[in-house]
Image (spheres, helix red, strand yellow):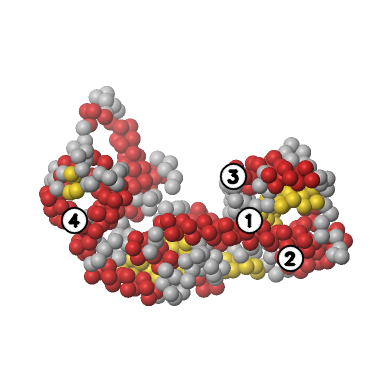
Amino acid sequence: MAKLFTAQLPDCLNSYLNKHKNPTNTIMETILIIDDEKNYLVILEALLSPEGYEIITEDNAINALRLIRETDLDLVITDMKMPKMNGIELLEESKKINPELPVIIMTAYGTIEMAVEAMKKRAYDYITKPFRNEELKLTIKKALENYRLIKENRLLSEALSDRYKYGNIIGKSKPMLKIYDMISKVAQSRASVMITGPSGTGKELIAKAIHYNSPRKNRPFISLNCGALTETLLESELFGHERGAFTGAIAMKKGRFELADEGTLFLDEVGEMPPSLQVKLLRVLQEMEFERVGGTKTINVDVRILTASNRKLKEDVDKGIFREDLFYRLNVVQIEVPTLKDRIEDLPFLVAHFIEKFQPSKKKKIELAPEVWKALYNYSWPGNIRELENTIERAVVMNSDGLVNIEDLPDSFSGKKEEINIDRFIPLNAPLQKTLEQVEEHLIRRALKQCNNVQSHAADMLGITKSLIQHKMKKYNIVV
């Protein structure tokens, strides 16, 4: 018969201490243990840490609930009898936050009725103290495996529903046939791919097609827009942070590299990454290991990197803005995505796709008038596929009889200049300086929203420099 875990405390503590002499760890699953008896927390942490789990302990159920809400957890183990909130109540609140997160309830006062109630409330398991070490470890292992399977199935289901396959990339033009051929070749490799092209051409769609046609298709696809965050937030998003690492870091958070382990990490607008983070990213790509912000443990990952940029990064390398060694590590294979004008023969297929996407009733047939087709073909499309999508969505919403006319398109397609009715929106007694500032702030916020908070894109839209928009954002306290 196996010994009870209380009898193995010295061995557990020795293993725990030996483990922490070497801070290098692979990706660890995170377990939160709640018990108002602190000696149990020490014992369980000593027992489970050597198994490769990241253990968080809490002796207060109210605080534990906050951790469940704010921390990336894989399992919760809670005692039944605790002040203020018992294990069943904690279980119920946990299921409201994350219905799939497994919860194991333990108690020294077990009854059949209590066990039945716990299972009815969807506890993963119910165990009584004292319990055998190996039985506890096995229960935990099964709970984590089950949760891992649930998350993988959810990811796969989302991928299939979004149809990130070749069929979701619309077009039969020669440039697109070349793209399909490159996707099929690079998808099976581990090579880093840099996807370049102007904004709105569908670079992220290409990245997803590579991932979902690769051997990693059943693992996570994680994306991050490097141009939408400040340097501090970007570092935290990439590598995660420990609780208390900086002001506002109220709980441990896993970064995108951890979340993408065994899958793919897509870094959009990588050219916007500050030089200090370029150095750290290069190190991670070389070693596939990092530490969370404020942490000391080295975490190993297996991640494929895909990047995208609308900048000419080789020119940025020549100017010293972007690191040359990082550029060549990211640019093993380059896929240049054509503009809409360069693949204008795909216009009918794209229009049909977006009409099907946005039409409110599949029974209602929506067609474009001849002058609308002419206007679409003659337009310059500075916003590329994204602008076409927005144009067709507007046309579908605006038309009433199923036939899209030129009046259903924005004024830029009919040659009219859009005029602002100042008298309608601004009172006659409006103070000039305050009004100008309000309009300026509104335009900046609108441009940032339209450009997914990428400051360089918003600056281009407004016809100003990136440094100027950053100055204005600071002036109006605009945080993205």
- Residue for badge 2: 50
- Residue for badge 3: 97
Marks 1 and 3, how far apart in space?
13 Å
The structure residue drawn at horizontal position 22% and vertical position 64%, both measured from the top left corner, is 343
Nearest the eye: 457 or 113: 113
Q: Quadrant of residue 311?
A: bottom left
The structure residue drawn at horizontal position 77% and vertical position 42%, both measured from the top left corner, is 113
162 sits left or right of 105 in the view:
left
Disc 2 packing (10 Å; few <14; some 14–19; many ≥20): some
- Residue for badge 1: 74
Going from N to C along the chain, the mark reached first, 4 or 3, is 3
Nearest the eye: 448 or 37: 37
- Residue 123 in the image, given as x and y percentages of width and height: 68, 48
Going from N to C along the chain, the mark reached first, 4 or 1, is 1
One can see residue 325 in this view: no
- Residue for badge 4: 380
Kindly identify the amino acid type of the residue bearing the numbered disc 4. Ser
Marks 4 and 2, how far apart in space?
62 Å
- Residue 22 in the image, given as x and y percentages of width and height: 70, 70
In the rendered structure, are the residues bearing label 4 and label 3 in contact, judged by CB atoms less than 8 Å apart? no
Is 169 located above or below residue 477 in the figure?
Answer: below
In the rendered structure, are the residues bearing label 1 and label 2 in contact, judged by CB atoms less than 8 Å apart? no
One can see residue 214 in this view: yes
Disc 3 packing (10 Å; few <14; some 14–19; many ≥20): few
Task: Name the front one of labels 4 and 1.
Answer: 1
- Residue 417 in the image, given as x and y percentages of width and height: 16, 42
Kindly identify the amino acid type of the residue bearing the numbered disc 2. Pro
